[in-house]
Amino acid sequence: MSSYWDALGLHLAADSDSAKWRRAALEAAAWSPQPTTRVSYTAANRVLIVADAATADRIAAQLPEKILVYAAIPAAQSGAAGRADSYHCAGLTVRGYLGRFRATIDGDGDDGDGDDGDDGSRNLAEIFDIRSGFFDQVLDCGDAPLITAAIKPPGYYFAAAGADAEALTAAVATIPERIGEFEKPKYFDYHADICAHGRSGIGGCTRCLDACPTDAIVSLGERVEVNPHLCQGHGACAAACPTAAIEYVYPRAAEQIELLRVLLKTLREKNRNRGITLLVFDDENGRPAVAAAAAQLPGRILPFAVEEIGAAGLDLIAAALAYGANRVCLYAPAAPPQVRESLQRDLGVVAAVLQQTGCDARYRAEIIDDLGALERVDGAVDGDADSGASDVIEPVATFAPAGGKRSVIRAALSFFSEIGNDAPPTATLPAGSLFGNLSLDSEACTLCMGCVSVCPAAALQAGGDTPALKFIEGNCVQCGICARACPENALELESRLHFDARFTATPRALKQEAPFCCIRCAKPFTTRAMIARMTDKLQGHRMFATPESLRRLQMCEDCRVKDLFDG
């Protein structure tokens, strides 16, 4: 088991007391995350170039002879181009990943090659007599990328026609290196049983779909599917998921948060509880700049590496602040728009809680795009523990990062209500947050229990023998399925965090009524509100035109049948 100092791999300064304490804390922390499974790619030598004929020939001449080049020439109508390795393509689409790209074209060409799809499209690889039906790599030199995801799949390269010579050069150099067998980590686990994407045909949470920059996630009705070959581990899906149905596993959040707890505890013991700035960065985009600046980072700045910056979710940010980092800086110089938006949403939750508990003067979390912002954040330029942001920060939270993502977030954010001055019992959160309340229009609600049947988190419950609708606020993930399912539009979401864990874990009645009893046999079978609503809606119907037929609505199902025959 290695130390986190070794795993971090940075040449940090050790020329001041605070820098020496930082190194001691990093060396004392053990780091050996659980391994994850692997995802494999196998790519042969079939490369599709999307370009005009002259450009495709010029690119093909730059590639090694072992590579088989096929040209898709954009055209108004699909058809043969006069040579076996080229084809005029109308309506060209490309999807897939390294070793398995499927290209299709409109099916109105002048030959019958290629199997027709359900939409009349044809498989371009089959037209070229490629038996597998797939291309291994795609070099797209069109005016706009055929794959529009913010982060392109491995094996796909876009170099705008005549406008991006640098990207074209890089692609030509990379293509030969991507022939063979390759592996990468599987970054996620998906737990469909707790997914709040949909129930009974009613749409719910789409946070993961909105956050994914690689378009690796697709909707399958009541659940989602994540393609591990398209997923590149940006982590925004897991950070955004309100139920932890999508879980980041490279490494797992609980392991990283426990490491943070140990690091911050050890460093605070050594620096006499002075303030600490946590610098969170990722390996691909953040490490080069952090490594270059490492020797100049003051001892009060604690670097912390994640696989991708998007994986630094609300649980990690909130826990870091509660454990004693008074500043959290997320270094995200190249974060895709979806990832940045996800981070901003989480930071908005943190800011709302800090502001409403009166802790915003001592704690802050933010995104930075250049490391020079660290000095502006802390107001100090040296490594002396008594300068700048070194105010004593205490007390700190002591909870263990156990119980899952929601428990960690709730414990961390509730800590600030404990230390804040006159903190309110609840904090209003930005719309769309993962915690919240439900307000009920009790006059409109008929206690039909349609909302109970579709709730994916068991936040809504029936009252058993007594007609009642009960709500457990701690379970609610604000997916909105219940509100969409309600035939009376009686439910409304309210984003908030109630700091009392006992209150949020206790079922409370949103509405309760005495049961309505059958007027013939006295058996309780529905509610007064339901009878009133049915009477109001059906009294003009021809089947209930007489007082006797309308009166049957007040009978249980057995007595209605008897009354019909008795009449």
Image: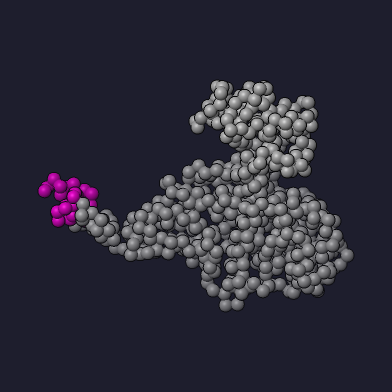
Question: For residue 379, which quarter of the picture?
Answer: bottom right
Task: Give me the residue at 62% from left, 24% from top.
Answer: 80
* Observer-nearest of 565 and 166: 166
Furthest-bottom residue in this view: 422
363 on left or right of 115: right
Task: Give me the residue at 48% from left, 43% from top.
Answer: 221
Give the total of numbered labels.
0
Furthest-right residue in this view: 15
Q: Position of residue 2 (x, y in %)?
A: 78, 50
* Observer-nearest of 477 and 429: 429
Magenta-colored stretch includes residue 538: no
Q: Position of residue 536 (x, y in %)?
A: 24, 58
- On the question of residue 274 being in view, the answer is no
Question: For residue 163, which quarter of the picture?
Answer: top right
544 on left or right of 436: left
- On the question of residue 1 being in view, the answer is yes
- Residue numbers of the magenta segment: 542-567
Main SS, magenta region, reads helix
* Observer-nearest of 373 and 529: 373
Q: Position of residue 444 (x, y in %)?
A: 34, 62
In the depicted structure, whether residue 198 falls above or below residue 401: above
In the depicted structure, whether residue 67 falls above or below residue 280: above
- Render colour scheme: one colour
Q: Position of residue 346 (x, y in %)?
A: 61, 60
Task: Give me the residue at 77% from left, 49% from top.
Answer: 1
Task: Give me the residue at 60% from left, 77% from top.
Answer: 421
Magenta-colored stretch includes residue 556: yes
